Image (tube, rainbow, N blue to C red):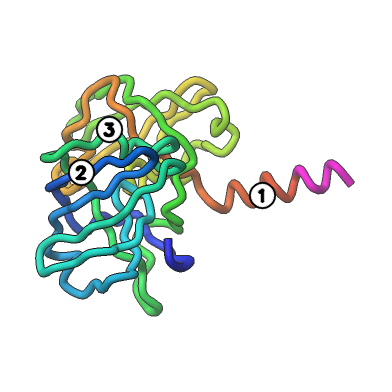
Amino acid sequence: MSEETMFTGIIEEIGEVLAIEKGQDSARLTIRGPLVCSDARRGSSIAVNGTCLTITDLNEVSFGCDVMAETLNRTALGRLAPGSRVNLERPVSVGDRLGGHIVQGHVDGLAKLVSRTPGDHWETYRFSSPAALSRYIAEKGSIAINGTSLTISAVTPEWFEVSLIPATLTGTVLGALSPADEVNVEVDVIAKYLAALTNKERSC
C-alpha cells in the first residue's frame, strides 16, 4: 500500500479476476473493473474484497496489483482464481459522504459462513466468530465482510449475524456465498483503538 487511505465499505463494483501469476511468496492479480479504473492511476489504492492493494498496472478496463505473502496468508485473496468475482471500492475522497463506516482495508482475520436464512426482504447470514476478534464484535456495531460495511444484528462468543438487503445481495459478491466459504473480516477500527487504550490503562 502506497499511502494511508480510508474506505467506507460501500462497494462500487463487482470485478472479475482475469489472471493470477503466482510466485514463491507473492502473487500478481489482474482484475477487470471498468468503473474503478475510470479515474485511477498507477500507485492508487484499491480495496479488493476489503483488502487495500496498490495498482501497479492499469488500462481502461482492468488493473494489476501485487500481493505479498503476508497478505496472502492473512486474507482469502490466495484462494482466488481466474473468473472469481471480487468486491471493489476506491478510497474515499475529501468531501465525500461517509455512507458506511470507517474501513481501513486492513483485514483482521477470516470467518466462515455458517448459514443463510431467508427473510421477507432480506437474508440473515451467520458467520463463525474468530476467537481473536470476538471482543471487537458487538451487536449493532459495524463490521466489514469482504469489504462490505454491515451492521451486526446478533452475536455470541462463537458466531455473529448480519442481515443483507436485496441491494447488498445483488450488488456485492456476498450474494454468491455458500456455507463454509471463507471471507475477509475487518472489525471496527474504533473498537480496536478502545481496546488498545483500555489495555494500556490496565497496565499502568
- Foreground tag (3 vs 1): 3
Callout 2 amino acid: Ile
Residue topped by disc 3:
79
- Foreground tag (1 vs 2): 2
Mark 3 and mark 2 lie on one chain; the one further toward the N terminus is 2
Q: Describe residue 153's horizontal placement relative to residue 179 as left or right.
A: right
**Image quadrant containing the N terminus:** bottom left
The image quarter in which residue 186 lies: top left
Q: Label 1, secondary structure: give it.
A: helix
Checking the image for residue 194, the label placed there is 1
- Foreground tag (3 vs 2): 2
Query: Residue furthest toward the right?
Result: 204
Checking the image for residue 20, the label placed there is 2
The foreground one among 120 and 37 is: 37
* Position above or below: 8 against 198: below
Q: Give the residue displayed 56% in from the left and 39% down from the top.
A: 136
Mark 1 and mark 2 lie on one chain; the one further toward the N terminus is 2
Q: Which percent across, then down, holds residue 23? A: 31, 41
Q: Label 3, secondary structure: give it.
A: helix
Callout 1 amino acid: Leu
The image quarter in which residue 150 lies: top left
Q: Label 2, secondary structure: give it.
A: strand
Q: Give the residue displayed 24% in from the left and 54% down from the top.
A: 88
